[in-house]
Image: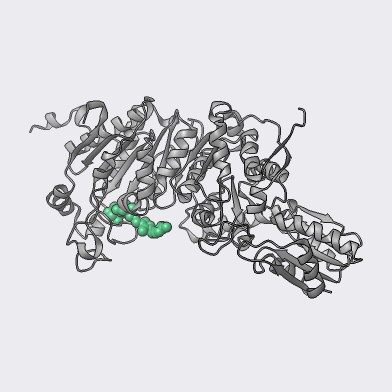
Amino acid sequence: MALEDIIKPENLVYKKPDIMNDNAMHYCPGCSHGVVHKLIAEVIEEMGLVEDSIGITPVGCAVFAYNYIDIDWEEAAHGRAPALATAIKRLRPNKLVFTYQGDGDLSAIGTAETIHACNRGESIAIIFINNGIYGMTGGQMAPTTLEGIKTATCPYGRDVKLNGYPLKITNLLKELEGTRFVTRQSVHTAAAVRKTKKAIRKAFENCLDGKGGANVVEVVSTCSSGWKMTPAKANKWMEENMFPAYPLGDLRDRDANI
Amino acid sequence: MSEEVKLMKGNEAIAHAAIRCGCDGYFGYPITPQSEVLETLMEVEPWKTTGMVVLQAESEVSAINMVYGGAGCGKKVMTSSSSPGVSLKQEGVSYLAGAELPALIVNVMRGGPGLGTIQPSQADYFQTVKGGGHGDYRLIALAPASVQEMADFVGLGFDLAFKYRNPAIILADGVIGQMMEKVVLPDFQPRMTEEEIAEKCPWAAVGKPKNRERNVITSLELQPDAMEQNNIRFQEKYKTIEENEVRYEEIMCDDAEYLLVAFGSSARICQKAVEIAREQGIKLGLLRPITLWPFPKKALADYANKVKAMLSVELNAGQMVEDVRLAVNGKVPVEHYGRLGGIVYTPDEIVEAVKNKIM
Ligand SMILES: Cc1ncc(C[n+]2csc(CCOP(=O)(O)OP(=O)(O)O)c2C)c(N)n1
Ligand code: SF4
Ligand SMILES: [Mg+2]
């Protein structure tokens, strides 16, 4: 591919949106969180929603997302973001209300809040970073941790007899009548980044057209620190191991009868 | 407005008062003996009139976090529950206090521990005034002793919560929640406009206009020195509240030789006990703390110079008595009389306790 083929506006991946401030990010090199932050900031800016967005941060590595994107935020207790989002959206129906949650936050401690907010069809967007591990607390097992994978709390590998099976929570959520758009994406290549951005935009648009329904964008992600891999190796490992368990694509799109 | 007298349960009064106080949102989960709050709101459907949001959450955990979300975006929001449910709310209560959010919580207490009983109790005093959730925080705690006060304290609780950016709690019990009494509901007050929210809650996450920095509602501060400063600020606020917001009622205290100290439904029964004792020539008085925190420490310390002894009468195994003793600081004997597990004392039993324990 020639250079001029690459340098085209539609291929522009790394321009910093204006609402991404200059605070130094605390994320590890290669972490997916930073990429997804940028996509959220871009979409908010492109949709002209800077003044009309309220984001909810989780407890997890992304707890400090509020330090990097210049919109109003609420920081939730671990797992409770969808409950906050429910109230904010109902009290301020014209706002874009979205949560940003890790797999521990969303699919362990916050399972009830997640399922019920989705089941009520709250007009919110849930951005779900599934890195298969508890990044923030130092790499313990998450509900999404794959079978056989070693973590700080399953040092001999996840044993399904002891710990149950990797939880495909998004597959559960798509079955709920309250969900409108449920998709699974990733950000390991430029093409994947663009797809994820489109998915986030669609989720955000759905939140504001008055039709209702919850929108879930899962991003299968890497945690190079927790996985104890280089960022490049983590991406490769994710493709080979995470994607078979968490295949990418739209799981539900009621507007397209999916 | 004409003072229309209505007859209703304490729980119903809470619901009607909330609508009339311009409450923006109520989030709750059913539990006896307070389910009438949510039931009344669902029957009245205030979203069709004032625009108030009412939602049955999937749990008390979720309900209190909905309150956190709503309060964080500048709205006047509340929840109610009873003891086991209030235990579940403690995480959210601590976060509300840590993020300095105004909100109203109602606990219509029942007997515990555990699933306990659905009968009335006052055994959540410690939980309410000593913490409940983690960290050094305080709740402004109002203890209604009548259906009228159930109605009045909704507005008062919200006012204090917004004045100090601190959660407030109405600590009632099954007696006050379930009994029917005459009540004059507060006048209708419109919900806050966006302009009023901007003025009262400039910190709220309402969507960031161009001309200000982003607002972030959080209790997180990883720098210990900054977190200590936050805590110092909280403590200063609590001190101001202690100086300005103590409320209590004195009944037949002027010439009292013996003093009952009781709150909520116990105070109602004690009032009758005072009458009976006086008929028998015992100079008994009653001090009723209306705010359990801030506690009427000074008033009690003053009475320690006037009376011979005090009896703290509570539907628990002896909780508020510890605060009475701290206030009195050994000057006069302070004893406790209580019934447990949902049993309520009679006025005569209280008079007997006075004779046996402090005379
Ligand atoms: C009530 C509560 N329990 C436990 C914790 C500790 N904790 C903080 S983050 C976290 C897990 C985060 O994992 P995840 O949601 O997957 O986010 P990641 O860091 O991987 O992005 C845990 C258990 C907490 N803060 N609060
Ligand atoms: S620990 Fe993992 S999730 Fe957290 S910042 Fe580092 S790479 Fe990202
Ligand atoms: Mg994780």
Of residues B289 and B34, the one nearer the viewer is B34
Using residue B324 as the reference point, say whether residue B120 is left or right of it.
Answer: left
Q: How far across and how far down the image is residue A76, in percent? A: 44, 48
Count of marks, rendered view: 0
Q: State the image quarter where residue B326 is shown.
A: bottom right
Task: Pinpoint residue B247: horizontal percent, then vertical percent.
Answer: 76, 52
Q: Is residue A234 left or right of residue B120?
A: left
Could you say which quadrant of the image residue B346 lies in?
A: bottom right
Is B4 placed above or below A34 here? above
Name the image quarter holding the C terminus of chain A: top left
Q: Quarter of the picture for ligand 2?
A: bottom left
The front one of A188 and A129 is: A129
Q: Quadrant of residue B269?
A: bottom right
At horizontal 26% and vertical 26% (from top left) the residue drawn is A255
Whether residue B249 is visible to the viewer of this picture, yes or no, is: yes
Residue at image x 56%, y 35%? B24
Q: Is residue B126 above or below residue B43?
A: below
Q: x, y percentage for residue A157?
A: 19, 65
Pinpoint residue B17: horizontal percent, then vertical percent.
65, 38
Residue sitting nearer the eye, B84 or A83:
B84
Where A63 sits versus B20, above or below?
below
